[in-house]
Image: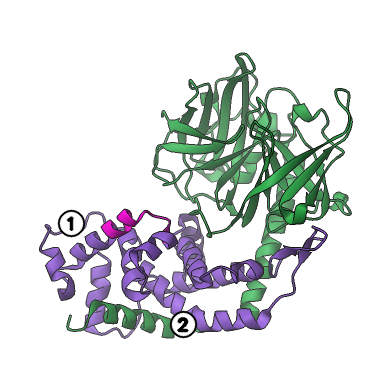
Amino acid sequence: MPESFGSMLEELADAAASAVALPGTDAIRRRARERVVHRRMAASALVLVLIGGTGGAWAAVNHHTRTDATAARPMDGASAAPVPAGSPASAAPSASTSTSGGAYAFTSSDDMSIWKTGLAQDGYLMVFSDGVVALSTAGSFPLCYGRLLAADSAAAATPAVLAGVPTSKDLLTDVTCDNFGVTSGLSVAVASKGTELVVTVPSNKSSGAYLETYARQSLFAYGATFPAMFQIPSGTWKSMDGENRTLVVGADGSVSFTAYVNAGKQYTGTGAIDMEYPTGIRAEIYCANGGAKTAPCGVFLIEQNPQTSDELTVYGSYGPETFVRTG
Amino acid sequence: MYSAAGPAGVCGADGNWEVALPDELDFDEFYTAGFRRIVGQIYAMTGNLAEAEDSVQEAFARAWQRWGEVRRYGDPEAWIRTVAYRLSISAWRKAVNRRVAHHRAAASPELPGLSPDHLTLVSALRKISPEQRRAIVLHHLVGLTVAEIAGETGSPEGTVKSHLNRGRKALAPLVSEFAEVGAEAPRRSGTDVVGEW
């Protein structure tokens, strides 16, 4: 080629640029609004699936064989029934040990924030853009599940999250953390000019009312910091603490876990990856041990970077932990 | 309390989260000045014009949703380019777009009316990996340094240098400017050619 490579590349890019029309900014803003509508519809659909799907969940778990035409979608997986306590994680329906990953119907979402307690032992609170909250507490695995609802519109199930941060003062409902002693009546308020979250825990049988303060660690915006995950890290993954915890991720997005915590007691649960976030993918889990089995009880945030890596970074307990592939 | 679209919020004096007023003119100017340029850059990285156009539109839509935040970044255009690139290589997104394209009989991703030299360049770019292509486009088209490319791609500088070097070697047989680089190593096989190009 007679011309310099840079000039040729520039001409090629210019040719491409001049071949496209410049949509008006109104079209871009309309597209932004449509994204929001889609996300709200997805959130509404999730609520409907959770309400309507629980009745048939036990039936579904007895029909492991799925044809291609009825392969599980992410939201279906999210409402899958829990595995009874004692069942091995490898028995999870549709679990696969494929290492190749694949295209997957993530619902992409934009923002999340991570907050950390000031206690000596790490404790995290993650706020996702659809209002789901994940809390790490001592001995728990996976992260405890909760939901943020706007205090003035709780009945409407409106996610009280703006750009990954809760709004001024919101209800924290459906909390499954045992150590809080309560599952409702909690609230979250933003304090210190947005750098802290204060969780108010009402009095309960084991303690009086108290406040838990979390300092903001990170606020992730899509594409700004981490590469987005768009492949399922399918396979079997074990923690590095004597392999006491196992995650089995299926190529269809199903996730099951087995954990030996609390003096070797076995805990199990199943769920599905349902959201893609800037820092990883989120799985909502239905635990088989304790608590209601008809609603999510736990959350995993899973990162794999690079996506061919044989290591996962899993937020499921105190903080990020490394899981290695064993199958 | 919940604002779904528009610029990101800010913390008010009382610590509450408040929605900032949009600076539409600022966004409009940024968008008008950069849209076509970024489409050209993403096209050079991916080789699919329709996908590049759509992903850049989507990236600008996402930028508008949090414009108050994005505008404060050192280089908002790099944010748009990064988001658009990641969108354009998303396997799931491609699958959806292909289905849509099938129904509307979308045009070929090839650019019409390219000169022989441009066709040679297109052919050459098809022979290198997406990571190498991205590094080469960012360096030779966007004009970024190795450190800047490392920052934008999230890769170590050594990896960027490797991508640039290997990309140049692979292009050497077709780009005389890189011939000297290519003479240092054997030709690359075409077995690892992936991506749109």
Query: Is A23 colored magenta in this rendering?
Result: no
Alpha-carbon span between mark 1 and mark 2: 34 Å
Q: How many numbered circles are shown?
A: 2
Residue denoted by label 2:
A20
Give the chain ID for the purple colour. B
State which region is magenta: B153-162
The residue pinned by badge 1 equals: B189
Pointer 1 and pointer 2 on the same chain: no
Say few, some or many: other residues with alpha carbon within 10 Å of mark 1 (under 14 / 14 to 19 / 20 or more): few
Residue at 35% x, 68% y: name it.
B145
Q: Main secondary structure of the magenta part?
A: helix
On the rendered structure, is B134 left or right of A218? left
Asked if residue A14 shows in the view, the reply is: yes
Is residue B129 among what the camera can see? no
* Kind of residue at disc 2: Val
Q: Nearer the viewer, residue A323 or B69?
A: B69
The chain that appears green in the image is: A
A95 relative to A58 in the view: left or right: left
